[in-house]
Amino acid sequence: MSRAAPGAARSTKLSVPSAALAFSTAAVASLLTGCGGGAPLLHPVHPLQPGEVMVGAGLSGQLALKPLPQVSAATAPNQAELQDLAVAPGVAPWVAGRVGIPGSNEGGLTYTGHALRLDIRHAFLIGQNAALSVGLGGSAIIARRPGDGDADGVYGGGADLPVLIGFHTSSNIFACWFGPRGGFDILEGGVQLDENSLPLQVSARHYYGALVAGIRVGFRHVHLALEIDAAYHHADGTFQASTVPGMPVTPAAPTSSDVQQFSVTPAGSLEVTF
């Protein structure tokens, strides 16, 4: 690999403060946004070099494409709540750090407002510029925080498996990736649909399959990544009215709800590697 000319190296050093300032601005802005369910990958197929670190910040938007079907007035609020908990349409922050591990491996930690995801992946090199990446991620989920009318909040965990194939240029100025990603979540907790209703205990399962496509462009230490995910979701769950201390009322039997949804998740991030 050829070394950059001394003048070019000095130019890169002068540009790092500007890149850091832009990254910090993006990170703060993303943390102040709402908590949708988008959880894009936003990394190329080729892993970082051992010991190399990437930090990035950006936004994603989870768009639900299918209107909820007409159901009875009694179960409609439960179905809408189930979609909000599982699919979680809305705008989400994306803040991540990744590190290269010897043996063509890479690990990462990503915060998306809705979840905290820890993952590891391995890349199988295909020729000089192409690769196949297989990863495994585990997520701690905050589907609904307590407060704002909610009883206890809804929490859970999940796992996902992305399999990506992609290409990058020898200079790493451009990279692209594409592939399937599947996963599941399990959610438990308590919500209150409105101030006049009893708290409800929720138990839900969420399964999804997605196609992921992304590109990354940049130079040396600073890159811009763009990705779009198209996914099918299936969620089912039960809602059980909670007992209230001092009220000798037997709660109604639990009600079941399910949601089938299609979503599109566009996302972008600014990433700095060092």
Image (cartoon, rainbow, N blue to C red):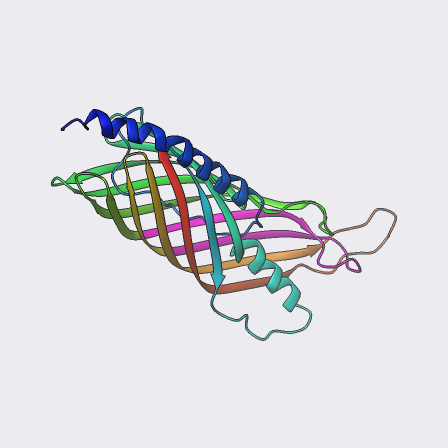
- Viewer-proximal residue, 125 or 30? 30
Residue at point 42% right, 52% down? Answer: 267
Identify the magenta region.
180-209
Q: Quadrant of the C terminus?
A: top left
The answer to whether residue 202 is left or right of residue 1 is right
Residue 103 in view, yes or no: no
Q: Residue furthest left?
A: 127
Q: Position of residue 143 (x, y in %)?
A: 58, 48
Residue at image location 72% in from the left, 46% down from the top: 147
Q: Nearer the viewer, residue 271 or 116?
A: 271
**Quarter containing the N terminus:** top left
Horizontally, residue 71 falls left or right of residue 232, namely right
Whether residue 43 appears in magenta in the rendering, the answer is: no
Give the vertical position of 244 relative to 20 (above or below). Answer: below
The total number of labels drawn is: 0
Say if residue 42 shows up in the picture: yes
Q: Is 163 placed above or below 101 here? A: below
The answer to whether residue 16 is left or right of residue 261 is: left
Would you place residue 70 above or below residue 131 in this image?
Answer: below
The image quarter containing residue 211 is bottom left
